Amino acid sequence: MVFSTRKWLAAGAAIVATTAVAYSETAPGDVAIEDGVVTESLTGQPGDAMAGRATFADRKLGNCLACHAVSDQSEQLFHGEVGPELDGVGDRWSTEELRAIVVNSKAIFSDETIMPGFYSLDVGVHVREDLVGKTILTAQQVEDVVAYLATLKE
Amino acid sequence: MKHQYLVTAAAIAMGCALSATAFAGGPVDEQLVIDGEIEMTTRTESVEGHPLDEVISGWHYRTKETRALEADTFENPAMLYVEEGQDIWNTVEGTEGKSCATCHGDASESMAGIGAHYPKWDADSGRPINIELQINKCREENMGAEPYAFDKGGQKPLTAFIKHQSLGQPVSLDLAEGEMQSWWEKGEELYYTRTGQLNLSCATCHENYNGYYIRADHLSQGNANGFPTYRLKQASLVSIHNRFRGCIRDTRAEFPAAFSDELMALEVYVTWRGTGLSVETPAVRQ
């Protein structure tokens, strides 16, 4: 009985997964980073730069400001200095490169970088129970942040 | 494409090196003298085998106002807890009708310098113990009293009172005692283990980026010499295991129980990293 309930749940999960595929969202394990780029959008949809700007600042989401200063968000009180300033980052890197950095910075800079991988399951030990198997940002949030970064030109 | 990417990466590496000098807040260049009398060692050459050349107290990374609070015992809000600890020291509790003072007398004599050498090896339990666990041992074995639960009852004020008797004394641990060395090694391993969804280790923040602002927080070396510490944010005393748990939680990881083997090993190792710094208990932090 218990067994068949499990089987039913598994079938349910498969259906959910199929639905996700219908939106053509790439799962974290399936994102290919080659030569420092992720060429395809993770969602097949364009990112929303304004939503990305908010995700960038939100402490519960990107919290990118913890480590990066950016003049475009001077209304925010505190900008960290652990990473480079991101003014002009859209000139320095292509959209495909920016996507790779946000997805998994470890694959771009080095294994040792302090910058978290925002769409990667290559995480530390003892991940908080409710976050196991989850990425920091969703695929769409990554696309939004990448679209925002691409607007940071000098 | 590849070539361009490499060039950009090099430019970034340079940008980082520049920003390290241009923007980093770094530790302030000042001396901590408490009540104009006790000259504190807050920067010193690190002990052999330490990954950093110099160990620096968290005091140097705090604001002018916060630093001033610690320099004056009348202004230091945590001194109220130290006084509370003194009262507990003299209070009889448990079935044996004893207080701490019954056995140890005047703490300013019997406890002078003691807190600078904890955690130390405890042969009875076969593991290192800190002041909190030593207090619990005395309560159970000598006073016939219940041990304090983590951070409860008189644990924080009494620990602060005992450590305060070592104010200004240099931190030093005896790693030759019992199996302290293997606990140190376990602590070192944990210090460099990345935890949580954010994938960060203690070293990522406190070794690689001390002196930098991470949003509004000015990262220090994460030394243990000021604990229990008064945190202005929480308006109360914070124990060292509470701090460890908070830092681990911030990496979005499950954190170990207070006084677990993991956190005791970490306390041995982190305290050792601060060897030579003065005991600052009760330090004032943000």
Image (cartoon, rainbow, N blue to C red):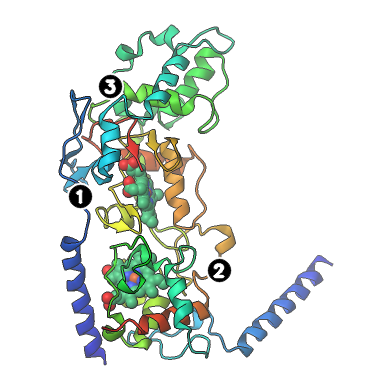
The correct choice, above or below, for B19 with respect to A21 in the image is above
Q: Residue A129 appears in which quarter of the rendering? A: bottom right
Q: Residue furthest bottom?
A: B1
Amino acid type indicated by mark 1: Leu
Residue pointed to by mark 3:
B113
Residue pointed to by mark 1:
B52
User: Where residue B130 sits: x, y (%)?
Assistant: 40, 30
| Left or right, B73 with reference to A137 | left
* Label 3: which secondary element: loop
The correct choice, above or below, for B4 with respect to B36 in the image is below
Mark 1 and mark 3 in contact (Cβ < 8 Å)? no
Nearest to the observer: residue A123 or residue B34: B34
The quadrant in which the C terminus of chain A is found is bottom left
| Left or right, B134 with reference to B178 | right
Mark 2 and mark 3 in contact (Cβ < 8 Å)? no
Residue pointed to by mark 2:
A133
> Chain under label 3?
B
The correct choice, above or below, for A147 with respect to B254 in the image is below
Q: Is residue B123 visible?
A: no
* Label 2: which secondary element: loop
